[in-house]
Image: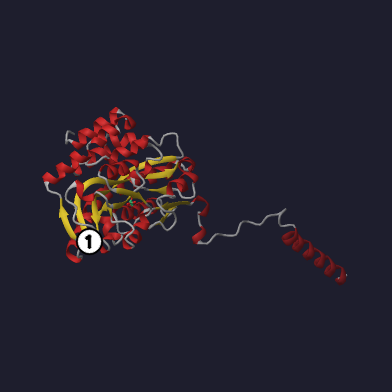
Amino acid sequence: MKKTILLILFLFTGIVTAIGFGFHHLFPFKELPYDDDQKGLRDQVLIKFSHVVAENTPKGLAVDRFARLVEEKSDGRIKVAVFPNGSLYSDIEEVSALEEGTVQMIAPATSKLQMLSPKWGVLDLPFIFPNEEAVRHGLEGSIGKELLQTFDGTDIKGLALWSNGFKQLTTNEKVIKKPKDVSGQKFRIMQSPVLDAQFTMLRADGIQHQFNDTYSLLDRKEIDGEENTVSNIYSKGFYNVQQNMTITNHGYLAYAVMINRSFWDEQDEETKNIILEAMKEATAWNEKEALEKNKEQLQYIRENSSMKIHTLTKKERKEWLNALSPLYKKYEEEFGPSLMKEAIKLRDGNF
Ligand code: LMR
């Protein structure tokens, strides 16, 4: 009898064990509890944000701020992984990377978007913004809206326009005061047909190269100079390999903040609202911060470098404007009458 009971117990234990291990796919156990790090893992959203400038710049800081705001507002559910300094993609590669969805967000210079729509070139017209007020009208008014609409029906959604600041000229040749002073010199420029046309008009050579090659091109003396904002000249150390800078304010460096459209469309309303809210706050913050950073870093360069700095006089500025104004006529047809009319209004201070 005792033997029979032991045999039944033995068989019963065997069957339970077999069900537990052997046939667990037929009788699934309850899921293992997640630890804290894994909690809600499936709801998490990861945004890879790639850009090419240093972290201590108007764009670098605005991206970091946007990332923080998104994380805070979503209680950590939405993460923004930031890749600065072209560590993931160069400025030449980043637009395709966004279109293909290998990154979800980028914020390239508007000058580099003429390959998507020539209209973006309007912001590269020489001296289009006489001052900061004109910049705000241009970026936040009808021009900015029309430009962001060029993304409609594409793989990209435009979220905002950010600011860096006015561009200046640096060179290792003599101090630039008049338009003829740049003649025969080689300058690194962004990938922009309008910028190329400007340098050609001045009988200079505008060489389109990726941003993160500029320092070595200058250092190796393969080019004489470059045009950029004080913030980029400071953060990339161009002032260490250039003897002269002229405060020309001849152009403006703005950014288009863009997101991959399929990624955007996949998100729920709550996620979209958090991204939009964070973008609005980061954009307002960037506007003030950009002004501060360029001012502060110009002061630093003045006090701590051997660079000679000349600021165009009113008379010199007029000479530059006269030399380059035929470009407004040249691009009239390409940009269309409404954009060009607005551009001329801004240039002439009629806004
Ligand atoms: C440049 O290429 O000079 C700038 O667009 C870099 C940047 O993103 O500010």
* Side of 227 where 1 appears, left or right: right
Q: Residue at x 34, y 57 (%)?
A: 214
Name the residue nearer the viewer: 287 or 243: 243
Q: Residue at x 75, y 60 (%)?
A: 22
Quarter of the image with the C terminus in it: top left
Residue 257, by quadrant, is top left
Quarter of the image with the N terminus in it: bottom right
Secondary structure found at label 1? loop
Residue 141 picture location, percent across and down: 26, 36
Q: Residues within 10 Å of mark 1 (few under 14, many from 20)?
A: some
Up/down of 41 relative to 337, above or below: below
**Which three-letter amino acid code belongs to the residue tagged 1?**
Gln
Residue 299, by quadrant, is bottom left
Q: Residue at the front extreme?
A: 184
Up/down of 169 relative to 341, above or below: below
Name the residue nearer the viewer: 224 or 40: 224
- Residue beneath disc 1: 243
Q: Is residue 44 visible?
A: yes
Residue 341 picture location, percent across and down: 24, 30
Residue 119 picture location, percent across and down: 34, 35
Any atom of ligand 1 within 8 Å of the CB at mark 1?
no
Q: Residue at x 20, y 46 (%)?
A: 179
What is the tally of numbered marks visible in this picture? 1
* Side of 321 where 6 appears, left or right: right
Residue 296 picture location, percent across and down: 20, 58
Q: Is residue 288 visible?
A: no
Up/down of 2 relative to 100, above or below: below
